[in-house]
């Protein structure tokens, strides 16, 4: 049994989102797989070219400044800053 060290519980979700970098000049589509008040798990086509911090814009227009906590080839965990 693994322990969960997150500060807030994550809720499973399948929402669309956009990773926004370069002051909005570059965007990457993503799927928000789970979400909490302090962070999210994002599914992307590839992490190539993604910086360690960016803005996440949800399909409802909500915007979060993010910092990458972990990443695999197609997923990343972010904390909201």
Image: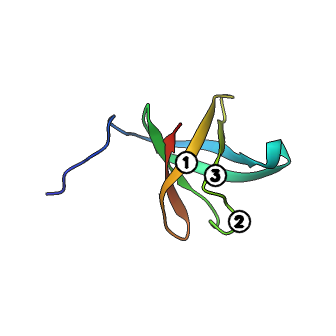
Q: CA distance from mark 1 to mark 2?
A: 15 Å
Element assignment for label 2: loop
- Work out which quarter of the rendered image holds the N terminus and state it: bottom left
Q: Residues within 10 Å of mark 1 (few under 14, many from 20)?
A: some
Q: Is residue 70 visible?
A: yes
The one of 11 and 24 positioned closer to us in this rendering: 24
| Residue 31 to residue 65: above or below | below
Residue 78: where, in percent of width, then height?
50, 48
The answer to whether marks 1 and 3 mark residues whose Cβ atoms lie closer than 8 Å is no
Q: Is 77 displayed left or right of 31 in the figure?
A: left
Element assignment for label 1: strand
Q: Of circles 2 and 3, which is in front?
A: 2
Tag of residue 67: 1
Residue ID at (70%, 52%): 29
Element assignment for label 3: strand
Residue 74: where, in percent of width, then height?
56, 66
Q: Residue 8 appears in which quarter of the rendering?
A: top left
Q: CA distance from mark 1 to mark 3?
A: 15 Å
Q: Residues within 10 Å of mark 3 (few under 14, many from 20)?
A: many
Precedes in sequence: disc 2 or disc 3 = 3
Q: Is 64 displayed left or right of 4 in the figure?
A: right
The one of 60 and 54 positioned closer to us in this rendering: 54
Q: Of circles 1 and 2, which is in front?
A: 1
Provide the residue designation for mark 3: 30
The extreme left residue here reads: 1
The answer to whether marks 1 and 2 mark residues whose Cβ atoms lie closer than 8 Å is no
Provide the residue designation for mark 2: 49
Residue ID at (75%, 49%): 21
The one of 41 and 24 positioned closer to us in this rendering: 24
Residue ID at (60%, 34%): 64
Q: Of circles 1 and 3, which is in front?
A: 1
């Amino acid at each position: 049994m693994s322990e969960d060290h997150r500060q807030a519980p994550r809720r499973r979700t399948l929402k669309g989102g956009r990773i926004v970098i370069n002051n909005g000049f570059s965007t990457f589509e993503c799927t928000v797989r789970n979400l909490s008040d302090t962070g999210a798990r994002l599914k992307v086509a590839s992490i190539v070219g993604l910086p360690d911090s960016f803005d996440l814009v949800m399909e409802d227009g909500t915007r979060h400044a993010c910092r990458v906590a972990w990443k695999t080839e197609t997923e990343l965990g972010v904390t909201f800053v």
